[in-house]
Image (cartoon, rainbow, N blue to C red):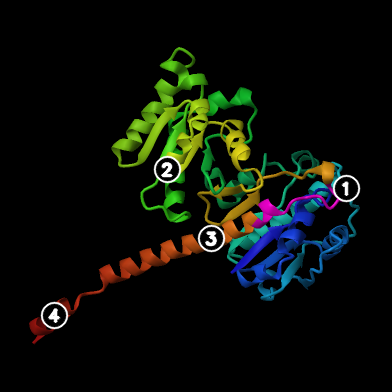
Amino acid sequence: MKIGITIGDVNGIGPEVIIKALSDERVLDHFTPIIYGSSKVMSYHKNIVKDSNIQFHHISEANRAAQKKINVLNCWEDNVNITLGKVTEEGGRYAKMAIEKAALDLKNGLIDGLVTAPIHKAAMKLAGFPHAGHTEYFETLFGTNGLMLMVSDQLRVGLVTNHLPLSEVTAQITKERVQKKIKVFEESLRIDFAIDKPTIAVLGLNPHAGDEGALGEQEEKIIRPAIIELKKNGMMVYGPFPADGFFGSAQYKKFDGILAMYHDQGLVALKALSFGGGTNFTAGIKGIRTSPDHGTAYDIAGQNEADPSSMRKALFVTKDLIQNRSDYHNFRANALDKKQRPSDNEEEDEILEDS
């Protein structure tokens, strides 16, 4: 199993947490890592992590990756001007190059999954990256509307809208969009998380879920009708729930997934409950792509203070997602094969008829 890892912003903590997460050699018993970036940059950051004995195996293509080694796929040969803790065009440019190479390898099946280290949106914009974030980039690349999903040991939170200013959220809350996100969520819970009959809670948009229209009409005119329609089709979806009471009373423990209307509504609660243990997953696309639940952390870049827990978690979540999706498709293929194969009695009947 090959898992790619993009280097992220070279001025942030991405390379550091990658090195720390892979420093335990036992990781190599589970998968073959391929770091998309630069041997020179990784060596620079290795000197920051002073107690690491990590050794890199340099490659030019993913199909040359060696098992039981930490592979670095060089996406450029340039000498990079690293400015730790700063937003620069260079930081965005090299992060962009690593993402584009790794994403194509994922799409072409050269790697089984991909973990993307943190990028800084301002630096990416300087480098001409037109997308709001990783999720939007991978949706465009794979040509499908996915679902931004944050998962931890305690809960799984999906988003109807991703990286949008709050002033633009309401216009994006439509019955069609809510239903599409629920369907992607339900399918991912079954295929990627091996939950046979998943239950999904849907949060309201307004305070108190609108209080029956007193504090907003989206719940009664859009969200509730969307839920009712899907329930009639057999989905186990419930709501809309007021977000504050839902998390405050621990109702989240009763559901396999929670769909929030906007970014901070869902992710503030998840990160408060499990910061450092969360993983961002782009559900609904053909490839498996995850990332840790933190950003570039410029304020501690180069100080050997970054915690690798979330990066390590993302790597093993990716491994589990790859395995779950493979098991699901293998089971379906075997079931279809058995269904199409004639039974022994059917074969005997055919022989008797021929004779």
- Indicate which disc, 1 or 2, sits on the residue closer to the N terminus: 1
Question: According to the image, label 3 marks what residue?
Answer: 320
Instruction: Tell me if residue 179 comes above or below residue 115 in the rendering.
Output: above
Question: According to the image, label 2 marks what residue?
Answer: 183
Looking at the picture, which amino acid does disc 4 mark? Answer: Glu
Which residues lie in the magenta part? 301-312
Looking at the picture, which amino acid does disc 2 mark? Answer: Lys
Disc number for residue 84? 1
Question: According to the image, label 4 marks what residue?
Answer: 350
Q: Quick one: SS at disc 4?
A: helix
The residue under the point 84% across, 62% down is 46
Magenta segment, principal secondary structure? loop
Mark 2 or mark 4, whichever is nearer to me: 2
- Indicate which disc, 3 or 4, sits on the residue closer to the N terminus: 3
Looking at the picture, which amino acid does disc 3 mark? Answer: Asp
The residue under the point 60% across, 36% down is 267
Within-10-Å neighbours for mark 2: few <14, some 14–19, many 20+: some
